Amino acid sequence: MEERLHPNLALKRAGAVDIVRIDREDALGALNFEIMECLGDYAARLQSDASRRVLVLTGTGRAFVAGADINGYDGVGQAEFDLFQRRSRRTFDIIAGLPQITICAVNGYALGGGFELALCCDIVLASRKAKLGLPEIKLGLLPGGGGTQRLARLVGAMRAKELLLTGRMMTADEAVGYGAALEALDPDELMPRAVALANELASKAPLALAEGKRVVDDGLDSSLSSGLTLEQRVLGALFASDDAKEGIAAFIEKREPDFKGR
Ligand code: COA
């Protein structure tokens, strides 16, 4: 059953997986201040909820999110615009830093802030109906939700510049070729694949799952040597966990492990 975080945000909980659906078809999922705040508040609660292991983000109809709500920019003063950008950054940063694994199931347009939301996720799956891009330059603007930085880190500086300076949209297959999405799927296959992957990830040893994400992200932010040191420390700590003892014992006893997350 779905509950509402906001009139435009639906939440479905299944096992250890949360599915958040942006539901604003008439504006192609555009994110206004209230939706952005609500999403950030939800993500802030999620980060300390150990019962939730995987978050799937998706949209409704022909769009995931077609960006920030451009209508909300009309007549807005500089201070209000700056506040929106700061508060958006809070939402994007919390989502990017979640201990849960995040999967973005891009069902349609993922433009501007929509593509940036996808870039905050660990895994992007895209419907072949999707179009992904950073069109802000067409408004005389640039991305403000991490697009210039996260995209360049993911696909390289040259591809990121070409995309954000032309503002053109990519197909799902092109996004996969660039490394900005993991898989391009037929529209009917998108959610089944996202949910199956989410369930598979949610069944893994919880500490190793969260640490596996963190060690990659923190390692990419540091030198190779620091990253390798972090990797060894994390492995050492995992070796001391009950879950590792259980995983090793289960392998030797030829049975399924029963991980407790400690
Ligand atoms: N903010 C607010 N409303 C938006 C929106 C946005 N980012 N993107 C689309 N919408 C609204 C349109 O205003 C329209 O509303 P209306 O029916 O009340 O006129 C509705 O969604 C449908 O959009 P429309 O442009 O008619 O659909 P389309 O199929 O012709 O084009 C897009 C689809 C995605 C190419 C086009 O809507 C678009 O370019 N959107 C803006 C993308 C953007 O620049 N994002 C970055 C924002 S910083």
Image (spheres, rainbow, N blue to C red):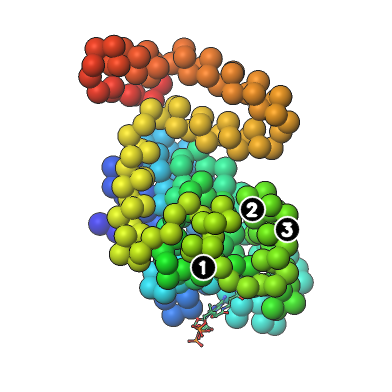
> Which of the pair 36/232 is nearer the observer?
232
Q: Is residue 221 left or right of residue 108?
A: right
- Give neighbour class at mark 2: few <14, some 14-19, many 20+ (Cα, 10 Å): some
Numbered label attached to residue 158: 3
Give the x, y percent position of residue 54.
Answer: 40, 43
Q: Which residue is mark 2?
A: 155
For the residues marked 1 and 3, what is the alpha-carbon distance in whole angstroms?
18 Å
Indicate the amino acid at tag 2. Val
Q: Which residue is mark 1?
A: 171
Give the x, y percent position of residue 128.
Answer: 42, 67
Task: Tell me if residue 75 comes above or below residue 78 in the rendering.
Answer: below
Helix, strand or loop for disc 2:
helix
Q: Is mark 2 within 8 Å of ligand 1?
A: no
- Give neighbour class at mark 3: few <14, some 14-19, many 20+ (Cα, 10 Å): few
Quadrant in the picture for the C terminus: top left
> Which of the pair 17/203 is nearer the observer?
203
- For the question of whether residue 175 can be seen, the reply is yes
Residue occupying the point 37% across, 49% down: 18
Q: Quadrant of residue 85?
A: bottom right
For the residues marked 2 and 3, what is the alpha-carbon distance in whole angstroms?
8 Å
Numbered label tally: 3
Quadrant holding ligand 1?
A: bottom right
Q: Is residue 92 left or right of residue 25?
A: right
